Image (cartoon, grey):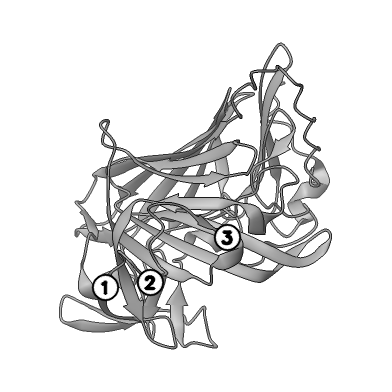
Amino acid sequence: MSTASTARAADTALPTGSQFELSWAQGEHRTRAVVTAVGATLRVLEVDGTALIEGFAETAAPLFCAGQILVPWPNRVRDGSWSYDGRDLQLPLTEPDRGNALHGFLFGLPHEPISQSDSMITLRAVIAASDAYPFTLTVDTTYTVGPDGLTVNHDIRNDGEAPAPAAIGAHPYFRIGDVPTEQLTITVNATMRVSVDARLNPTGTAAVAGTAYDLSQGAVVGTLDLDTAYFGLTPGADGTYRHTIAAPDGRRIELWGDQNYKHTQVFTTQIFPTPAGLGWAVTVEPTTAPPDALNTGEDLRWIEPADTWHSTWGITFVAAAAESDTAAEPEAPEGEFS
């Protein structure tokens, strides 16, 4: 039986449903991930024992949207209201303290595995048409672990009779083993940001060069206070967008997305729940559209009936280069969650 197909019977009673473990191994090298049936949420990711995300226990629900997939919109829709075909529509206010609709529907939906192996699983959920969002989408999310991390594919099919608006995001909080998060350096090659009001809804845009929002040369997490959407990203020669999260010892994570992921959201907090108590956390979210895209239409994807929109993003771990004196690097601790 494949690793991915092994889910304990009790898992169905857990807050995030069945737990699917993925594993890639070759010699002494191993990559491990755990994803959940509810929300297709990424709960654990480790490479050679080094934890790369802030996970959560299988008996807990994710807080701060940790590891969730954000479909059919990431970020906020102001007042939860938007218009389609001359009709005013009202989304559930899932951020009630700010009066906004936050991060779509997918994160709360049960998923079924439709394809799986030791190192890969495809989870499927259906977003049913409603008065708030009158479109039916079948969403397949495929996680694949490999020698240096994780690749995630999303395939969104429009099962309705009219073009459907959609956008995608993901919400991983990053860490590198036991390195204090506030010591990590994040780099985002962006030229612009979205300005927001007190409810974190867009009010305009601004250039970041020469400001505290400029992450293009790297910034230490402990110096930042951000909940900021960035755009004007610089793609690589292969057309992908890459952002880095680096430790002082040279190890780093590369968060990458294909040509769809023209936007990213950076959020820092000092009150993230960890096994050691409340502390620092940072998420760099790959997103295909900016906040309030259902209203502005900016980079919103309209999927034609029976068509499928495909996109890919991933997390790659790059170990520190070997020192010239060949000193052994201390072994990283195992992740806290299983």
Kind of residue sitting beneath label 3: Val
- How far apart are labels 2 and 3 at the CA level? 40 Å
Rendering quarter of residue 34? top right
In which quadrant will I find the N terminus?
top right
Q: Closer to us: mark 1 or mark 2?
A: 1
Q: Quick check: 117 left or right of 271?
A: left
Is residue 134 among what the camera can see?
Answer: no
Decide: marks 1, 3 in contact (CB < 8 A)? no
Along the line of sight, which residue is nearer the eye, 323 or 305?
323
Residue picked out by circle 2 = 130
Q: Secondary structure at mark 2?
A: loop
Check disc 1: other Cα within 10 Å, few if <14, some if 14-19, many if 20+.
few
- How far apart are labels 1 and 3 at the CA level? 21 Å
Q: Secondary structure at mark 1?
A: strand
Looking at this view, name the residue that lies furthest to the top: 27
Q: Secondary structure at mark 3?
A: helix
Q: Closer to us: mark 2 or mark 3?
A: 3
In which quadrant will I find the C terminus?
top right
Q: Residue at x 30, y 64 (%)?
A: 209
Residue 223 has which mark?
none
Q: Position of residue 329 (x, y in %)?
A: 75, 27
Q: Position of residue 97 (x, y in %)?
A: 55, 88
Q: Say whether disc 2 or disc 3 marks the residue closer to the N-terminus.
A: 2
Kind of residue sitting beneath label 1: Ala
Residue 221 has which mark?
3
Rendering quarter of residue 75? bottom left
